[in-house]
Image (cartoon, rainbow, N blue to C red):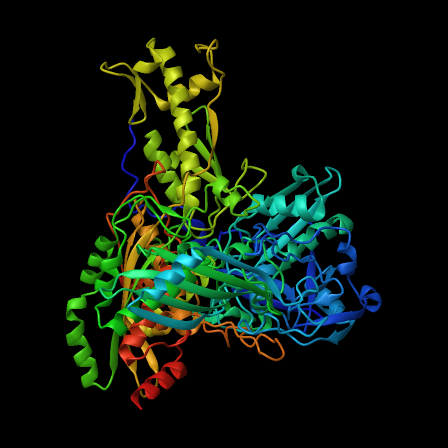
Amino acid sequence: MNARQGFIGSSVERREDGRFLTGKGQYTDDITLPGQTYAYFLRSPYAHARIKSLSTTEAAKAPGVLGIFTGEHFKAVGGLPCGWLINSLDGSPMKEPKHPVLADGKVRYVGDRVAMVVAETLDQAKAAAELIEVDYDELPAVVNTAKAAGASAPGQSVHDEAPDNRCYHWGIGDKDGTEAAFAQAAHITTLTFRNNRLVPNAMEPRAANAYYDTNADNYTLYVSNQNPHVERLLMCAFVLGIPEHKLRVVAPDVGGGFGSKIYLYGEETAMVFASKQIKRPIKWTCDRSEAFLSDAHGRDHVSTAKLALDKDGNFLALRADTTANIGAYLSTFASCVPTILHATLLAGQYKTPKIWCEVTAVFTNTAPVDAYRGAGRPEATYLLERIVETAAHELGVNPAELRRRNFITTFPYATPVGLTYDTGDYDATMRRAIELADVAGFAARKAASAAKGLKRGLGYSAYIEACGIAPSSVAGALGARAGLFEAGEVRVHPTGKVTIFTGSHSHGQGHETTFAQVVADKLGIPMDDIVIEHGDTGKVLFGMGTYGSRSLAVGGTAIVKAVDKIIAKGKKIAAHLLEAADTDIVFEGGEFKVAGTDKKVPFAAVSLTAYVPHNFPHDKLEPGLNENAFYDPSNFTYPAGTYICEVEIDPATGHTRIDRMTACDDFGNVINPMIVEGQVHGGLAQGIGQALLEHGVYDDETGQLLTGSYMDYAMPRADDLPSFTVETAKGTPCTHNPLGVKGCGEAGAIGSPPAVINAICDALGVKDVPMPATPYTVWKAANAAAR
Amino acid sequence: MGMQITLTVNGESVTREAEPNTLLVTFIRETLRLTGTHVGCDTSQCGACTVHVDGRAVKSCGMLAAQAQGKSVTTIEGLAAADGTLHPMQAAFRTCHGLQCGFCTPGMVMSAVDLVQHHGCSNEQQVREALEGNICRCTGYHNIVKAVQLGAAGMKA
């Protein structure tokens, strides 16, 4: 029986939903092992302090305590590594002070890990932690992003290795050419702004369960993580020195990541280390308050941008100076976010001939800052789309028209900041977004709002992102310390059923559905005959995991390449069975056929032959039907689109209501439109959250986190958001992967913040409103403008 | 000092020991090992732990196990029919792609059932306001709102 074809492009309902809707999901905290013990982390109450003394004597005697671990236990092992080397403009490598598993003599942010208590119960571990005596010698805290560089007195910097608190001072582009272009400019637009600090807030807090098997002499770590193989590699090779084959890392169902679960954290590292001593499984689940303090945060840039234009509105040059707060320690990919993932996107959709960007990364006494949904690309898009829209208003030109005048229209296009866009049609997505948003009807709506005493504004954002984060050779030349390929394995069972193993990890993206759609179409078999396995180093051959909207473009392609190998081998087996030449066999609709004849053999007969090889070309082939592939892309992929936001503001209260949010994206080919649209919805909510609500705030003096719970940190809720108008353009398929796909996970969060702020500025007739545009902020701007 | 607590959970009577300060959510997850009910915060804001107590939605992190003495609790595991047929609200979440990572989903579904049963929410704005106590980070709520409206129609059918 032939299976239905055409899964690709179809909104197939998700296969993972059954377990999630009935409470059968298995998240890390749902796993309780025989002999389970519990860990609790004592954290620093101070932003910056030396630990004068630390005594665990009394705590160790407390009921149920099995072990207490401090920085002393980890002196001999490595620090948590940073995966990307950035060199400063003067050629010196970034300052890379040790990021200890547990604090070593000094604490550097509120929430820094001071000690881990392991006890029979969580309550006992918490009670014992209160008996740990720590004598702190408090130091002045470095908090403010813009003021951190050079702010510390001698001996009081965040790290002794970086006395001026600078991690690196990096640049990209053509500095002299940019200066020369500015000298010729007819108009220069300048903006200085902050890209607000965000707390990722995956709804499942981080969690881990570590177990050492005394007999087998190996470890198992269950952890809420986006890339279990990377977690294992970093923990084994750089920190604990455990042989890599002796540690199995399982990331089971994971309740959202958004970047914050890419990283190797000290908590699970300490637990794996301790599990060999405790000889029982150790579980830890982060409280939400603890997550606010200890998850890697996102964004936190301060930038000045200048755009030079000629008299006709053509962009001549862009200059950007950014200070990026990377927090107290270099998290796993922190260094590449404000540099490689930010500055290389500053061409955007425009043929700006000259660009120069300098980035200073500063250490502060705040939680580490690393990739959060979009990772550098939202910051670049915000910078660029704010200054382009501002320039349009200053010149009295329609913002869409100014963009159109400067759009890149020929491909491939090499930008002045290191990327080569393979394909795109920026005018098409902008035109369609303008239709969808009914920009033509805006003037009437604005008049209607004005009649009610309300201010209505419209803002654009035309974003581009670089996804996939590859090829490895290019990334390596730019400082990456990891490969950036993906691996996939196709195991065809004797009966023709298929298990796919992917190095990508799904934590909401629906890989179990999308990847099965791809394989079902390729093999011409029902989706029910295919299962997708991911998230377990004990099953999956290798994987770089899920980040940078790469799962389908890189991980999906690895699977496709492995499927192609299956088909190629299947053709040889079929040729033998059908007594034809290999080259005469075609594979279509789940059957191997001799071209131009009615001779054929179904897929399952070929797979059975591979495993029961009685009549088999043993002289040419090995039995079995199992193939794997590693795919290293030849370029990034470049999703792009236009977002249009329309707001209505009540100047009396400063409340901003998003009336319309329109997104038109070019993601190339789309496998499951329903899932893709869902990804855009989620990204839009996070982008609108950044623009209107969310802000991770530390007290400038004490370094205390002021937004440490859902009572203080404004998460977007259902009644904060509108329904969205989302459309995926027919698009321009990616030219360098076989599926023609680009990636869709981050676009919403990248494209939306400048559209929202542009709309607010338009409504109020002001040049800038800082993010988050809370009612008070907007009220101040509205009333200052009114004066 | 533990205390005996007897209650009905998903239609079955259970008696277990619990400390007087044990939260209902802890009792459900740790004692009864019904792990579909989740903990997403520590300030009773996120709603991931929402269950039904005597037919009304309750954030089970804001109630002691002892307070459930003699009451009837329904968790996400008890919402579908005995033969596995999904409740109309569960089915609507699947149809509308109202879930991604699945972590907020049990609480979201339990809240949605309650708001349809007791508040009759049917238009978009009512649904959005009624879901204010359940946080989702993945979906942007767009498809959740659609799912609740579809589920409401299914519950009336």
Position in image of residue A691 (x %, y %): 39, 70
Q: Quadrant of residue A70?
A: bottom right
Q: In this rendering, is residue A741 above or below B42?
A: above
Q: Position of residue A149 (x, y in %)?
A: 59, 70
Residue B97 visible, this angle: no
Image quadrant in which the N terminus of chain A is located: top left
- Relative depth, front residue between A505 and A100: A100
Is A19 displayed left or right of A429 in the figure? right
Q: Quadrant of residue A242?
A: top right
Q: Quadrant of the C terminus of chain A?
A: bottom left
At a point 60% along the width and 56% down the height, the residue shown is A94
Of residue A481 and residue B86, the one placed in the foreground of this image is A481
Looking at the rendered structure, the number of numbered marks drawn on it comes to: 0
Left or right? Give the position of A500 relative to A392.
Answer: right
Residue A594 x, y percent position in the rendering = 28, 15
- Residue A304 vs residue A48, the one in the foreground: A304
Q: At 30% from the left edge and 88% from the top edge, which residue is drawn?
A: A786
Q: Is residue A322 above or below residue B93?
A: below
Q: Residue at x 41, y 38 (%)?
A: A634
User: In the figure, A247 relative to B135: above or below?
Assistant: above
